[in-house]
Image (cartoon, rainbow, N blue to C red):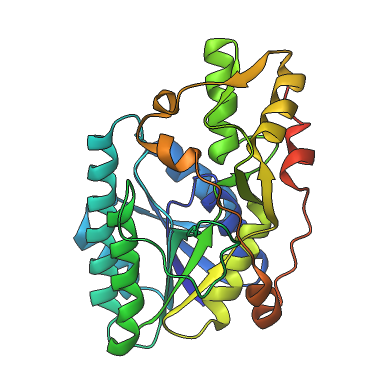
């Protein structure tokens, strides 16, 4: 099938595009810059120029395709205001894509995050919370899943806190970036809280599987590692970078601080059983060994 992809040069998208192409699909990818357009062309995709806020462009891309994978999201997470703007932009984009696909039974796959429930491992059956720093994003995804009643094979892939490749990406990547900037590998809370993780290329396989076969209105977990203690993650980063490790205030992590401090292990048992997803790439701690001082 021809698949319209937004966010095709991001951490996840740069793995999803080649995964789709290798499986025999063709890719029409949104590109907002010359650099992104060149990268997508080099990967073998056809480029559609525009940005996530260009709703007419999004509708045109969806109209030309047999299915859609929406991965694009704003790059500015530094302030609460910037995060709110990015969530609003994503919500409008998903609504436009869904309206274009209504009644066609074509797939629309969006990205979400694994939820959290105090005291236990979450599963695919747990709803994502619509309150908190990213509650508006959860509301947009919930609305997307409801499009199943309007003839859209909508589905979400819930990503864990860290999607990584070569030691980069996700919450662990943010710890590394702050460590390089401050000279200390700091983590919020007492460090016993657990973060789930997945390798980028394993996540890409799941996006393809969901696109190809997931039923309408379904959610799936791209979780390879159920949960590593944050202090263990920080310890590897500190050793690789040659920097001290220690607790820092939650406020150091901006609007994501409260989420960073949560214990949030997640399971992917049902995803593996139903879709046959089998993660095969290095886990987070092993991948962090690729970090260089």
Examine the rendered structure and indicate whether residue 276 appears above or below residue 291: below
Nearer to the camera, 20 or 262: 262
Residue lying at the far top of the rendered structure = 183
The residue shown at (24%, 51%) is 89
Q: How many marks?
A: 0
Residue 30 placement (x, y as % from top left): 38, 54
The residue shown at (24%, 68%) is 95
Examine the rendered structure and indicate whether residue 98 appears above or below residue 42: below
Nearer to the camera, 268 or 214: 268
Residue 218 placement (x, y as % from top left): 47, 79
- Residue 220, by quadrant, is bottom right
| Relative horizontal placement of residue 222, taking residue 50 as reference (left or right) | right
Nearer to the camera, 240 or 34: 240
Q: Is residue 151 visible?
A: no
The residue shown at (50%, 49%) is 40
Nearer to the camera, 250 or 163: 250
- Residue 184, by quadrant, is top right
Residue 149 placement (x, y as % from top left): 30, 89
The residue shown at (78%, 48%) is 282
Residue 5 placement (x, y as % from top left): 44, 61
Q: Is residue 157 visible?
A: yes
Q: Quadrant of the C terminus?
A: top right
């Amino acid at each position: 099938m021809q698949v319209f992809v937004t966010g095709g040069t991001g951490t996840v998208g740069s793995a999803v595009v080649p995964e789709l192409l290798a499986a025999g699909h063709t890719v029409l990818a949104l590109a907002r810059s010359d650099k992104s357009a060149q990268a997508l062309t080099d990967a073998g995709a056809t480029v559609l120029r525009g940005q996530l806020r260009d709703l007419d462009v999004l509708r045109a891309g969806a109209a030309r395709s047999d299915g859609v994978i929406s991965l694009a999201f704003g790059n500015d997470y530094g302030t609460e205001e910037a995060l709110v703007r990015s969530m609003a932009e994503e919500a409008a984009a998903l609504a436009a894509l869904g309206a274009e696909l209504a009644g066609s039974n074509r797939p629309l796959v969006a990205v979400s995050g694994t939820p959290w429930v105090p005291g236990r491992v979450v599963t695919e059956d747990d709803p994502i919370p619509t309150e908190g720093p990213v509650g508006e994003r959860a509301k947009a995804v919930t609305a997307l899943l409801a499009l199943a009643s309007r003839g859209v094979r909508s589905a979400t892939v819930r990503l864990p806190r860290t999607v990584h490749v070569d030691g980069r990406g996700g919450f662990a990547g943010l710890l590394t970036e702050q460590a390089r900037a401050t000279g200390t590998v700091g983590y919020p809370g007492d460090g016993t809280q657990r973060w789930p993780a997945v390798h980028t290329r394993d996540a890409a396989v799941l996006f393809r599987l969901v696109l190809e076969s997931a039923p309408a209105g379904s959610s799936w977990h791209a979780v390879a590692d159920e949960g590593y203690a944050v202090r263990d993650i920080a310890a590897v980063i500190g050793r690789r970078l040659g920097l001290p490790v220690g607790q820092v205030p939650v406020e150091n992590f901006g609007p994501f601080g409260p989420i960073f401090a949560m214990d949030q292990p997640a399971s992917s048992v049902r995803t593996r059983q139903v879709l046959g997803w089998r993660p095969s790439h290095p886990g987070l701690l092993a991948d962090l060994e690729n970090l260089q001082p």
